[in-house]
Image: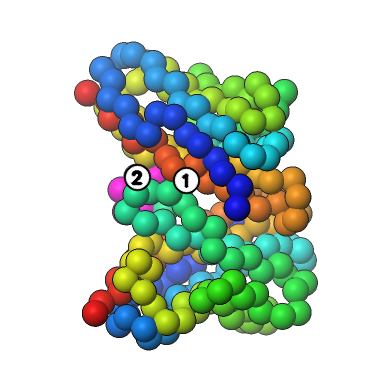
Amino acid sequence: GAVVSQHPSWVICKSGTSVKIECRSLDFQATTMFWYRQFPKQSLMLMATSNEGSKATYEQGVEKDKFLINHASLTLSTLTVTSAHPEDSSFYICSARDSGRFGEQYFGPGTRLTVT
Amino acid sequence: AQKITQTQPGMFVQEKEAVTLDCTYDTSDQSYGLFWYKQPSSGEMIFLIYQGSYDEQNATEGRYSLNFQKARKSANLVISASQLGDSAMYFCAMRGGGTASKLTFGTGTRLQVTL
């Protein structure tokens, strides 16, 4: 199956700093990528849909100025958590859609963010 | 609006036995896709199986099969010959309106395989 990588796998940062998370589709081109957030023992919550070359579409309640998404190429999307606060601590997972077959979504391994 | 319901927060199964994880859905779309993902403790979401709303046969992928009952709007996952490595969270998900739409996830079922 297709592979999606995510970097870093975990990060600890101080309150007020910004953190960038990268998501790459390694062996396929993804015109659409998704960013999810997952709290402990809960399901995945879609934050935004990222389309290559255009602005991301954010879900209701997600602050677009806080969670900056850039989809610069067909294989790379980045999520930047700006001015992070402890409540932003969470597990962030990206996903890339394969344009073939039935548009299967492949997920990255996730990034655990801890804001102190 | 789409909704996925997983009513089993946790399930136990003995090794080598089969287990069924329940999933019901609600949508007004005529065309939609149903997915199952496995999330082990490492956190990675692993795609298991897909069923299209117009597929006449139930999907199968190795030890995984999807019991698709369209009239009942259910898409249960059946795992045969359970293995210890199957212990994980399992999420049912749905996408409607064509491949451009987003996935909606259920709340998940935690499966524990015992000796």
**In front of the other: A18 or B17:** B17
Give the answer, above or below, for where B73 lies relative to B31: below
Give the answer, above or below, for where B96 lies relative to A49: below
Picture residue at 31% right of the left edge, 14% below the top: A16
Amino acid type at mark 1: Met
Determine the residue located farthest toward the bottom in the rendered image: B17
Chain holding disc 1: A
- Quadrant for the N terminus of chain B, please: bottom right
Residue B56 lies, in percent from the top left, at: 76, 79
| Colour pattern of the rendering | rainbow
Residue A104 lies, in percent from the top left, at: 65, 53
- Marked residue nearer the N-terminal end (1 or 2): 2
Find disc 1 in the rendering and name its residue.
A45
- Quadrant for the C terminus of chain B, please: bottom left
**In front of the other: A53 or B6:** A53
Whether residue B10 is visible to the viewer of this picture, yes or no, is no
Find disc 2 in the rendering and name its residue.
A39
Label 2 near label 1: C-beta < 8 Å?
yes
Residue extent of the magenta highlight: A36-42
Whether residue A76 is visible to the viewer of this picture, yes or no, is yes
The secondary element bearing badge 1 is classed as strand
